[in-house]
Image (cartoon, helix red, strand yellow):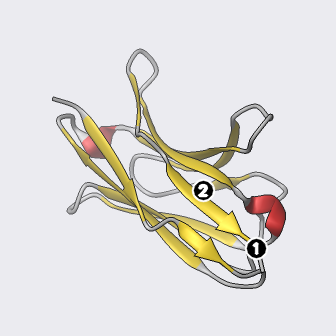
Amino acid sequence: QVQLVESGGGLVQPGGSLRLSCAASGFTFSAYVMSWYRQAPGKERELVASISSYGGGPNYADSVKGRFTISRDNAKNTVYLQMNSLKPEDTAVYYCNADRGVFAYWGQGTQVTVSS
């Protein structure tokens, strides 16, 4: 059974930091590109960051470059998103995604709220 379980979301003040984790099981984690997406109320889901199967070539949305860092630990079947200098516009549900072309999986999402 494929599972992607996100954790680490919550309420944080502007300028603060959060670290999201996504624990994967039920598939060959190391063979998949892993990504974080987010969806704010009334908006479409957007790609935040992605990382290749071996950990190289991370890509970021322009809106988070220099503030967010994606990483993965293939030994722990986990992908992370370190979020620094958070802004109110980062408020959204953050989703973990595993993609290998034909096969793609989603987590249930974790809420991140940036507010004073």
User: Would residue 63 be found to the left or right of residue 40 on screen?
Assistant: right
Q: Is residue 93 visible?
A: yes
User: Would residue 62 be found to the left or right of residue 109 on screen?
Assistant: right
User: Would residue 75 be found to the left or right of residue 54 on screen?
Assistant: left
Q: Return the x and y of residue 93 as percentages of the image width and height.
A: 60, 48
The quadrant of the picture occupied by the C terminus is bottom right
Three-letter code for the amino acid on which mark 1 is drawn: Ser
Q: Return the x and y of residue 105 as percentages of the image width and height.
A: 39, 29
Q: Which residue is mark 1?
A: 115
Q: Which residue is mark 2?
A: 58
Q: Return the x and y of residue 49 as percentages of the image width and height.
A: 63, 52
Q: Return the x and y of residue 18 as percentages of the image width and height.
A: 56, 76
Viewer-nearest of discs 2 and 1: 1
Identify the residue at image location x=60%, y=56%. 58
Report if the CB atoms under discs 2 and 1 are less than 8 Å apart: no
Residue toward you, 81 or 8: 8
Where is 54 relative to 116, above or below?
above
